[in-house]
Image (tube, coloured by chain):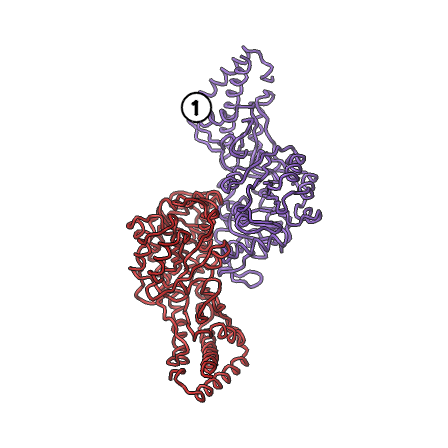
Chain colours: A red, B purple
Amino acid sequence: MTFSALNLDELTAQRDRALSDYDALVRRGLSLDLTRGKPSARQLDLAAAMLTLPSGHTAADGTDCRNYGGPQGLPEVRAMFSRLLQVPVAQLVAANNSSLSLMHDSIVHAMLGRLPGSERRWADEPRIAFLCPVPGYDRHFALSERFGIELIAVPMDDEGPDMDVVERLVREDAQVKGIWCVPKYSNPSGVSYGEETVRRLAAMPAAAPDFRIFWDNAYAVHHLTDTPVEIADILALCAENGNPDRAFVFGSTSKITFAGGGVAFFGSSPANVAWMTGNTGKRTIGPDKINHLRHVEFLRDEDGVLEHMRRHRELIRPKFEAVDLILTKELGGTGLASWSSPLGGYFISLDVLEGCARQVVSRAAGAGIALTPAGATHPYGDDPRDSTIRIAPTYPELDEVELAISGLATCVRLVGTEKLLERAR
Amino acid sequence: MTFSALNLDELTAQRDRALSDYDALVRRGLSLDLTRGKPSARQLDLAAAMLTLPSGHTAADGTDCRNYGGPQGLPEVRAMFSRLLQVPVAQLVAANNSSLSLMHDSIVHAMLGRLPGSERRWADEPRIAFLCPVPGYDRHFALSERFGIELIAVPMDDEGPDMDVVERLVREDAQVKGIWCVPKYSNPSGVSYGEETVRRLAAMPAAAPDFRIFWDNAYAVHHLTDTPVEIADILALCAENGNPDRAFVFGSTSKITFAGGGVAFFGSSPANVAWMTGNTGKRTIGPDKINHLRHVEFLRDEDGVLEHMRRHRELIRPKFEAVDLILTKELGGTGLASWSSPLGGYFISLDVLEGCARQVVSRAAGAGIALTPAGATHPYGDDPRDSTIRIAPTYPELDEVELAISGLATCVRLVGTEKLLERAR
């Protein structure tokens, strides 16, 4: 029953049914929150033992982790994440609790100092532009906007950004200095970059000698299935293709251990790592190495990380399955919406009829269901089709997710039928 | 026996004795380090119980400290340090482990955004200059130099910077945008700013509408005596004098709990705090609140902090006393050196004859005694009199401090007598 095939009477009946369902929903007085990609309390409980670690204070090399020093972070915590983030230990930096900070600071240091390959500080450039595959992560966009960086949206398909568009813009415009990528289980579409996409990113000619790929591998080990997605090794491919300094790799344990108390990582070429640690050496006398040690004691090694992630999966997969089940039941075949079925990560991307996303989010708010603002998945908060809604199902309990998605589906039906009626008139 | 009053033969004899002592010193093959203001392992042991805290994960207001959020930091850790840092709780921000980072980022945000009162971003100013009371802290200078900030040395006396010089430069030069201050137990001279100095800093007219005092209160509770020095309240005085946004206050627990795993603070006017949290809100989804909670559980309250600092004092005061005793015994009355007797903080400032500091540091290195490079206490590493040496006695064990200072005194005698002989010829 594709709603666009209904006649006016049938559509009106569907709209009336949706309106009645919506009124009932509002009367329930819900207060549910699907806005942010936060782990739930149960997920955080998985790392409860970490609160009373470490049992000692000495690193493998004898370093007293309590004191100042060690700008690159503990070797053992870097070793634990080296293969998982596809960065050699010597080229990996372990920092404090936020990978977003490392992205921010990478831009700051490029603005106020010279990147390897830069002809001048970015602050002295007439214009700086970054490519933003969409839908994408709103904090990437907000961070860039704050520095006056121009954001250019690039469409995504199932293999990642449209590489024909990316290659053209990067080749033709020397002011395009970067691209934001979430290469695995992308926020919010769940797309993982295909090998050919990664290879083309690494190999493409760039007009800017200081072009950088901001490779935010936030969901490197955040699998929802038994067959983990593997992505191509961006650093190795950049080096092979004569662009060794092209990629900045970011990652963190925020969605592994504690969202607010994890360890963030920066990985890149030896030249970029020296540039980064040279800059951070002016900023701090070292990261919180006790937290590094705490993570090493708790997670032990690479297998320990993967084992721990399986426990997360047990908690969050039912929520993703519930979303898919309810959306299928309530909206399947109506043509009013389509949605992603991600193999990992933290989000489901819901696409509603063109021109309907803002209204759906507004209707949901009216029924006590908080969603990420429509448009947030696009630069400047402007989704030109006004159709993408990001669903973050991890934080609420399962029964709350079910209630919220069922309510959201009602809003999609209401706004969608109203839109079709409007078009039909 | 002032050496400058000796005749040539007497001086030569003293030089020969010093040379013989120095040769004996070199033969001992020492390896001692007085370079950095680091707490010793015994000091860090005082906070050993903190390694296995916190016992829970919930803040007083119910916040789950393990998750994202809380850009200003836990209210209870801010409350604990509010009076100690002379900043109202609402105007205090608790961050991650490094106050140097907060100073760095304050400059970054002023460079790339507009400070309250700024006419333009500092990056768009033709020139930015900071006043640097000397002797001062090398990391302040290095951080400023990295951003191309011009550093203007200002002499210090026992009450702080020479305010006639400061007032004139700040009044006449609109490109003077800041001043670095360590107002209590200053690094390295130990000077604490007098009330009149603080009042004049708060009240003086400034040509730059966005002039800022960088008030690095690093040693707020780091007393070496039973009669703690109190300094005037810079934020209150700035507000009283119609310059509410003039001061940025910094502090940390780096030399209270763990040097590498403490909590850093930023305090200022409501407008500056809103500016700071607005900027950091683009950079991170919040500080490590678990570490905040850990500090609250361990230190409990303001009295707990002061009690803990008394334990530090028991460990480090003997080291400061040993330095003074040995320098008095070896150099007292010779006129070859003078040194500070600080009432708190982490350093002793040793002044040798003009033109001798570099040679003394070099001679000490030759005898296996590492000192902070001569000149480090001045902008651009350039001490025009080449006479100030910073001594950091906290990190080595007491017997090592004694050995090192005794050796250092030998170097001062050798270089000093050589200098006097050179002058006499």
Residue at left offset 40%, top offset 68%: A316
Q: Nearer the viewer, residue B418 or A172?
A: A172
Specify the farthest residue to the front: A172
Q: Is residue A87 in view from this perspective?
A: yes
**Name of the residue lying farthest toward the bottom:** A9
State which chain disc 1 sits on. B
**Residue at 58% in and 13% down:** B6
Q: Secondary structure at mark 1?
A: helix
Residue receiving disc 1: B26
Up-down: is B244 above or below B60? above
Q: Nearer the viewer, residue B185 or A29?
A: A29
Q: Residue B331 appears at what percent x and percent y? A: 57, 23
* Quadrant including the N terminus of chain A: bottom left
Q: Is residue A350 left or right of residue B142?
A: left
Instruction: Tell me: residue B24, above or below residue B157.
Output: above
At 38% across and 46% down in the image, what residue appears?
A272
Residue B164, horizontal then vertical, whole percent:
67, 35
Task: Tell me how many marks there are.
Answer: 1
Q: Percent from the top left, x then y, of residue B73? A: 55, 56
Q: Nearer the viewer, residue A98 or B293?
A: A98
Type of residue at label 1? Val
Query: Is residue B39 in view from this perspective?
Result: no
